[in-house]
Image (cartoon, grey):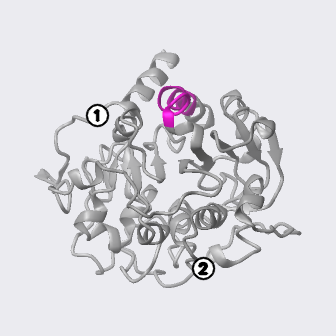
Amino acid sequence: MYTLTIALSVLSALSSVSAQAPFVSGSPVILSAYPSATAAAFDNDNKHGAPNGKAFKYFMQIWLENQDYSTISNISYYQSAAKNGITLTNYNAITHPSEPNYVASVAGSNLGVTNDDYYDIPASETTVFDLLEAQGLTWKAYNEMIPAPGWTGFSAYNGAYVRKHNPAIIFDSIGLNQTRSANVVSGDRWLVDVNSKNVPAYSFYTPNITNDGHNTNGTFAGQWLDGFLKAAVYDKEFYKDALILITFDENETSTARNQVWAALIGGAIPKHLQGTTDNTFYTHYSAIKTVELNWGLGSLGKGDADPSLSNVFAFSTKKLHYENVNVYPVPYMNDTITGLMTGKSYNETSSASPATST
């Protein structure tokens, strides 16, 4: 029964969500701020003149949820994935809880988000998506069980999809923009894009709240990951030129150092490094910095510009002409970080109001 449940869970991640429109208090929810904004995201070709990557052609992040490094490192599914790349034994989240880490992963700062509430971050705040677009590079945020492209609601399908795990849509510069919000799509779109050899330069893949381990455990998430990689990543055309980061938003034991399991896989990893470990100090800002240098994007000027928080992935330093720093002692990364958005959940920066479907 357990194996069947996992199998069905993997299949659900790879098939279209065809359930009827979710409802709030008996009334239909508007599925997207821009229902017509779907076709715009189907073409993932970079614009003419977009830069070539120095160390990789495609970058993808797959985020899982709330597990300690010591737990995950002993589970065979993650060990199997790591054999195809490099285990990052000193990778760290930024803070607690989940949403501030997701925001930080694309903005270089949690921007004062300190909880998992509904936030609309003002359009004046820049993200890695802005840097990518400025250079003509394409991106997509793939979210399992989001009801429709660009949907701005708080949660859907009894909480299987949650806004707090979708960093792109939290920013008004995307959520209120018809063209840009079309890049925030369902997880089933990933396999369509892969099989049509239409993968964007930058991808952020968020499993649903069961598959990512949040409402289950590390073993469940690991078996989902194993199935997803085998069905939709390994042996696909894009893989030979890809760098894929698999990681967790934060650890489970908030009193311990906020170390999370992470691994880099993909054809961009030299063969002689596959199956090895890297003990360089990394954070979620390291992914931003590595992407910035790979394509010459410039900087967000936040955590990505702090050398002590944004070491780039060591295998790529020569190609990126960057020298990492030794961070010691390693910080615990558990502090609550206040700022712009602190105390401003359910704020009025967006015309869309929070919605929860059942």
Which three-letter amino acid code belongs to the residue tagged 2? Lys
Q: Secondary structure at mark 1?
A: loop
Taking the spot 14% from the left edge, 56% from the top edge, the residue there is 36
Q: Is residue 296 left or right of residue 14?
A: right
Could one spot residue 126 in this view of the protein? yes
Taking the spot 70% from the left edge, 43% from the top edge, the residue there is 269
Task: Please state the extent of the stretch shown in magenta in the rendering.
Answer: 224-237
Q: Is residue 70 left or right of residue 157?
A: right
Q: Is residue 323 left or right of residue 205?
A: right
Across and down, in percent, residue 143 comes to 39, 48
Across and down, in percent, residue 38 comes to 22, 52
Residue 228 covered by magenta stretch? yes
Say which label, 2 or 1, has the lower sequence index: 1
Across and down, in percent, residue 351 comes to 21, 75
Q: Which disc is residue 16 wearing?
A: 1
Identity of the residue furthest to the front in this view: 49
Taking the spot 47% from the left edge, 51% from the top edge, the residue there is 203
Taking the spot 70% from the left edge, 39% from the top edge, the residue there is 72
CB of mark 2 within 8 Å of CB of mark 1?
A: no
Which residue carries the number 2 mark? Answer: 302
Identity of the residue furthest to the left in this view: 27
Predominant secondary structure in magenta?
A: helix
Could one spot residue 255 in this view of the protein? no
Q: Is residue 345 above or below residue 245?
A: below
Q: CA distance from mark 2 to mark 1?
A: 37 Å
Crowdedness near tag 2: few (<14), some (14–19) or many (≥20) residues, C-alpha within 10 Å: some
Q: Secondary structure at mark 2?
A: loop
Residue 3 covered by magenta stretch? no
Q: Is residue 119 above or below residue 205?
A: below
Q: Is residue 343 left or right of residue 312?
A: left
Q: Nearer the viewer, residue 73 or 343?
A: 73
